[in-house]
Image (cartoon, helix red, strand yellow):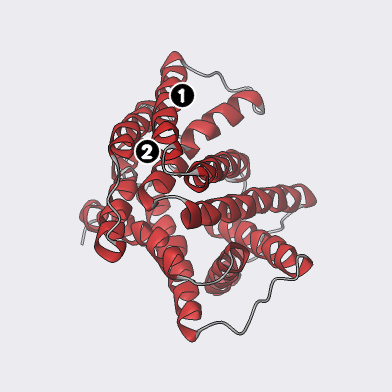
Amino acid sequence: MKPERRVAVLVPVAVGVVSFAAILIRLCTVPSAVIAAYRMTFASLILLPFFLRTAGPLKIGRRHLGLCALSGLFLAIHFLSWIESLKLTSVASSVVLVTTSPIFASAFVWVVLGERMTRRTGAAILICFAGSFIIGHGDFGLGADNLRGDMYALVGAAMAGAYFAAGRVLRRDLGYIEYAFLTYSASAVILLAWAFGRGVAMTGFAPRNYLWFLLLAAGPQVFGHTSLNWALRYLPASRVTVFILGEPVGSALLAWLFFEEVPGAGVFAGGGLILYGVYVALSEKRRL
């Protein structure tokens, strides 16, 4: 099968798999730190043989290791915040808000790396801000927990943006497998240390939880995100982005099927604005 056809088949499947992340997290009956730690630990173990096979004579300097550790820290905070968000607010609100991560990535590369922010990106940030306000205003009427969940989702988006910005630097020198394995491993270590430091039990859960952990790591984390990055070899980033924006829609539909959770009017209105804003930012002919 030609690469173009493989992309046409694989990318929609990958987005569908990624959309299950929020559902699998909701099915877990354990603290957020435990879910995040197991997800990244299992993902690192799955990537380990690929890393050993592809790294070869690669020599990774202290600078790269330090940046991977920093990237892993951003990723750890992202998962802690986003998973906690899913425990407090609706799947639709949480996933739509965390989808603003590319907007935060644009802001980070502008501030830290000095890359010029275009008017188009600036307009996209304002659009996303308006959408976030609409969702937050709607969720405020549902209680403090929902609004707090929205804030956690935005923190998760900001940390994912920082993770992407760090990856922009690291991917200049490291292959995707090397970068992913080192960053995932650093994130796993940080999350495990956080859990143990706070006295969070890591064992003794219902057996089905371990299945959800493994599926989270193998499906959305390794297969889903790896496939989307692989697709960038054959499609412009703007076209891949169009597919990625299907994740909130897929997650919302799955939440309706699994939990009978119907998004409110504010989520539809604000979510539509946010998705449009993200598309505006990423449809420029450049890659974050």
Mark 2 closeness class: few <14, some 14–19, many ≥20 residues within 10 Å: many
Q: SS for tag 2?
A: helix
Q: Name the foreground residue: 252 vs 266.
A: 266
Give the quarter of the image for residue 9.
bottom left
- The number of callouts visible is 2
Name the residue type under label 1. Answer: Ile
Q: To which residue does mark 2 refer?
A: 237
Residue 90 x %, y %: 39, 51
Tell me the tag on residue 270: none
Give the structural element (helix, strand or loop) at label 1: helix
Residue that appears at 34% across and 47% down: 248
Q: Residue furthest top?
A: 119
Residue 181 x, y percent position in the rendering: 59, 62
Q: Give percent across and percent down for residue 79.
A: 56, 55
Q: Nearer the viewer, mark 2 or mark 1?
A: 1
Tell me what residue is drawn at x 44 percent, y 20 percent: 126
Residues at discs 2 and 1 in contact (Cβ within 8 Å): no
Q: Which comes before the other along the chain, label 2 or label 1?
A: 1
Image: 207 above or below 194: below
Q: Quadrant of residue 137?
A: top left
**Above or below — where is 122 with respect to 169?**
above
**Which residue is identified by label 1?**
125
Q: CA distance from mark 2 to mark 1?
A: 19 Å
Q: Circle 1: is it few (<14), some (14-19), or many (20+) Cα within 10 Å?
A: many
Q: Is residue 42 left or right of residue 5?
A: right
Q: Is residue 104 left or right of residue 138?
A: right
Residue in the foreground of this view, choosing between 124 and 137: 137
| 214, 208: nearer the viewer | 208
Question: At which x and y percent is residue 106?
Answer: 52, 29
* Quadrant of the image containing the N terminus: bottom left
Left/right of residue 43 with respect to residue 12 in the rendered view: right
